[in-house]
Image (cartoon, rainbow, N blue to C red):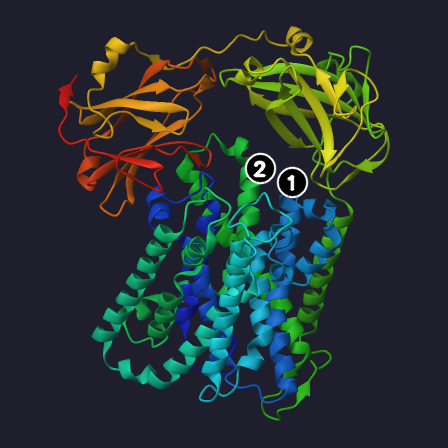
Amino acid sequence: MTPSDVSERPRTETIAVLTSLRFFAAVAIVLVHLEPTDLAAPTWVYRNFALHHAVSFFFVLSGFVQSYVYPQLEDGRAIRRFWLARVARLWPMHLFASLVWITLIPGALEPWSRPAGLPVTVAYVLLMQSWIPCLSFFGAYNAVSWTIATEMACYLVYPRLLTPLDRAFWPKWMLTAGVAVAAFACATWYGLPAFSSSTVGGGTVSGLLYIHPFGRLVEFATGMAVARFWSRRRRRLEGRPALATVLEAASVGTFLLGSHLGLRILPPMLADHYGALGNARVWFGLNGSLPFSALLVAVFACQAGQLSRALSWKPLVRLGEMTISLYLLHVALAGYYRVQLPRLAGLPLGVRQAGFWLVLLFVSNVSWRYVELPLRRTLVDRFVKNRRSGEWRSTEPGVEARFVLLRWSTVSVLLGGVAWAAAHPITELKVISSQDLSSCAVSPSGEGPVTFGGRMELVGLHFGEREGTGMRVLTTCWRSLSEQVLDRHLALHVIDANGDILRSQDVPLDRSGARIDRDTLWRTDVEFPAYWLSEGTRMALAVYRDQQLWPVDRGPSDWDGRRLIVAPEPLLAGGAPFQSPVTRLRAIAPRDLDRCPIPPSGTGAVRFGDRMELIGLSSASRKDGTRVLATCWRSLAEQVVDWHLALHVIDRSGAILRNQDTTFDPSGARIERGAMWETVVEFPADWLADGTRVALAVYRGRELLAADRGPTDWESRRLLVSLMGGREVD
């Protein structure tokens, strides 16, 4: 999402620095989406700054630019022209980026195969998907398009907000703020979950306040207010470059401070519901840089300081001009990178990172020059206002005929490509031949193939392992019994003697939405940790979509014949032999507890949830400059200790300066109640020079265990300890 190009306005003066700032804001958003990959920025960036606050900056800047470019819209014809220019600015690139997404990303058309596929797709094409605060809508297809959908909504109401800025504007700004407050009240009243993606079909607080136009319109109106303020006071910094430079640096600093505070205020994503106060924290954590964004835009728009002069450098302005292309294409390129990562793994990480950014900038520049600009000009030139006469005219026949032909050819290829890709999706299935069925030699029922719902047939199974990873692989071979779209999931359950699910792993059969022919053969692999088999006596397979399960026609089953029971023994006979995992914990006896003489709470042991107890600590320094923290634990239940111990070096406010995470036991072995072990965490000794305290947390996924005593923070989910002093060891 970006505001309109400053160079499009009818005025002769440009504000090049704002165009350059757009590029840096877009880079921040790209880094947000690269965080889960090895292309991410250094960890300290994500720990200290809420990079998603750049979205607030974009909306403020968009309101400012529209007020500067279109200070008044005289009549209905001018309003229609404004809307046409905005559609021409955003919609063609939206479609082109969608085509790139469909081409590069496996399963890109999955939203079409969902129950609400048609309304989701229509809303997406019309840039209305953000108007419905449900993940199934605003997260569909090229998900970052939600921002330009929200921006289009702001453009729709812009003429209503654009009374002469000297008259009746502030009541309208208050109205936009009231809309945001009403959205907040609605989210709190109905108890919407904050972030949970499990509620794909329902609304969330973040969807209503961060995605929906109701939460963003106040930012757009604030940008208009900044334009009003700036137009009156812009001359005050002329001829005062030193003061202007100081203000520019200060505005950047306050924006970064707001981003830092927003990250600290945003509650951890450990719960679905927070109440009114928690929702306020979510709101500020997601959108908290609004006043700082306004200050940044107002100061830099004066173009009076040295920072403004540096940012007006033409290459930076060019990068800012192609921001829309960069923003809409980066997720598709990052997704394609993940698909191709096995082929690129041999390259050094620095080479892969530099290559990604070079490709992204190159593709963005090409699409801006040869797709975005030509298509925009084609749409605008069809109804462009003659500046001399003030009349509307159409492009004269024969004028730039070759360029017009090229533009419409591009449009035709673009729309045709989207239509073809939508009609001919490529299946994700691992299609095999009849000769490959030997890889699934074990009969699923003992009596032959098993039919699921009359639609597909489980021909055979095979059990294997990933060497050196501790992972098992169940290979299933299937035959289609009709022409169909396999928009279903395969569920593998590890169950006990009563049929209760102990562990589960679900995989989609085919997310592409492609139709396959009758008698098509394919293979689906399900990978899971080997230790799961030590917890259950049997495995079960089910095929489902939403809450509908297909019945099986033979073999041992439960759930009214809708889940096939598979005993592991014949599978293991056809695969690698299974051995109970051996724990990797460093077991200790009671006499060894003198290794950890320091009580963690000052008053004794500290329990973490109902799973384990921290008995004691000890701290030591090695001659090589390494610090060693020894922790002694006792298990409070028979369990698999597949938890992680996080060590944080923190400052006085509790902010993480350094961290080191250690897995207790990656083997997956079960330990007895009362078992004791020692876990050692090593880290550079100079880390302690950066912070004042050390904190410990025990977590798995997003779940943190609560400590029952001692100095804590994070709502008692992080224990604060002191590591001052300590002996020296070899």
Count the numbered circles shown: 2
Residue 580, horizontal then vertical, whole percent: 51, 9
* Distance of label 2 from label 1 (alpha carbons): 8 Å
Tell me the amino acid under the disc marked 2: Val
Identify which residue, 556 or 307, lies in the foreground.
556
Residue 685 in the figure: left or right of residue 214: left
Look at 55% across and 13% down and name the residue there: 534
Q: Are marks 2 and 1 in contact (CB under 8 Å)?
A: yes
Residue 457 in the figure: left or right of residue 676: right
Look at 43% across and 78% down and name the residue there: 225
The disc, 2 or 1, on the residue closer to the chain's N-terminal end is 1
19, above or below 121, in the image = below
Mark 1 highlights which residue?
A: 106
702, above or below 596, in the image = below
Residue 553: quadrant of the picture = top right
Helix, strand or loop for disc 1: loop
Identify which residue, 57 or 590, lies in the foreground.
590
Mark 2 highlights which residue?
A: 339
Residue 527: quadrant of the picture = top right
Look at 66% across and 48% down and name the residue there: 102
Q: Quadrant of the C terminus?
A: top left
Identify which residue, 342 or 656, lies in the foreground.
656
Residue 557, horizontal then vertical, whole percent: 76, 19
Residue 595 visible (yes or no):
yes
Look at 54% across and 40% down and name the residue there: 337
Tell me the amino acid under the disc marked 1: Pro
Residue situated furthest bottom in the rendering: 389
Residue 566: quadrant of the picture = top right
